[in-house]
Amino acid sequence: MGTREPTVGGQAVIEGVMMKSPDRIATCVRRTNGEIEARVRPYVSLSKKQKVLGIPVIRGAVNLFEQLFIGIGALTYSAEVVSAGDEEVMEKKDWKTSLWTGLTVVVALGVGLLLFFWLPMVIANFVGVKGSVLFNIVDGVIRLGIFFAYLMLLSTWKEMRRVFEYHGAEHKSIHAFEAGVDLTVKNVRNYTTRHARCGTSFLLVVMVVSVIVFIFMGRPEDIVDRLRRLLAVPLIAGLSYEVIRFAGKHQGGALMRIVTAPGLLLQRFTTREPSDDQIEVALEALKHATGRHATGVEVATQDAGSN
């Protein structure tokens, strides 16, 4: 296996896990009756469909929007499966569903921009910091503070604990896959719940990279300058993606261990040790996504279109 295996990423959802390989997206959810329901879809990234979108940095910004759309779709599906109980879930593939998902992505992006970029800038301006470099450092410190507070708040939310356990199962399963071992619950149990390519690590890198980019942009003096900073967020996401991508490929290097250490440390707030049942769900999603799905698991929906 080793380096010839495809890169796999994932996301915890409600009572399940979504796994994504270069050509498949699989979402597996534990139903209330104990059975595992799986949705498997072919997948081709936008950066592969259009070569210009695969250029370094640009691909990171594209990936951010694409992953938001896929992630929200997976969360919606998992919620439908859990709420349906023992009843069959019939997915609606009409324009209303796509519109609702798109609007949810827009709202999520808007809230993120306001909370992590606009609010720190307003607070830093209210404090009265004058120098350009100092202003952006204070702005960055406030942004990091809000981010840390957000993660700690999530970690205290009891309803999120099972999601964090599935998050841990996702990471453990991917570690086992990357190590080339047999994908069994027993083998997966031996791996850590923390992973260098985790979204938590990515968000932390975004916070740090934003400070550097904003320093070059100077101190925002008017509304135009402030809006320009928001428009720079895709660039920041693209640069951060390249950092995480590089770190994921060089996890064994001493420098990369130092660079990724803060993000791995933060994952103590967003991952928990999973149960064997939860690891089983993550493994089913991983096997479906990589074409190795186990027998005895019904594929609920297999669509010719990508998510």
Image (cartoon, rainbow, N blue to C red):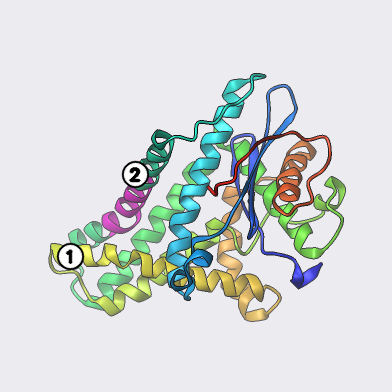
Tell me, yes or no, whether the highlighted magenta stretch contains residue 64: no
- Local secondary structure at mark 1: loop
Residue 281 is situated, as x and y percent measured from the top left of the image, at 73, 40
60 left or right of 88?
A: left
Q: Is residue 21 depicted above or below 133 in this figure?
A: above
Q: Is residue 182 depicted above or below 155 in this figure?
A: below
The residue under the point 57% across, 49% down is 269
- The crowding category of the residue bearing disc 2, from other C-alpha atoms within 10 Å (few below 14, some 14 to 19, many at least 20), is few
Residue 51 is situated, as x and y percent measured from the top left of the image, at 48, 72
200 left or right of 143?
A: right
The residue to which callout 1 is attached is 128
Per the picture, the main secondary structure of the magenta-coloured stretch is helix
Which dot, 1 or 2, sits closer to the camera?
2
Quadrant assignment for the N terminus: bottom right
The residue under the point 39% across, 44% down is 102
Q: Nearer the viewer, residue 66 or 124?
A: 66
Report whether residue 65 is seen.
yes
The residue to which callout 2 is attached is 107
- Local secondary structure at mark 2: helix
Q: Nearer the viewer, residue 72 or 265?
A: 72
Q: Tell me the tag on residue 193.
A: none
Residues rendered magenta in the picture: 107-120
- Kindly identify the amino acid type of the residue bearing the numbered disc 2: Val
Report whether residue 158 is seen.
no
- Kindly identify the amino acid type of the residue bearing the numbered disc 1: Gly
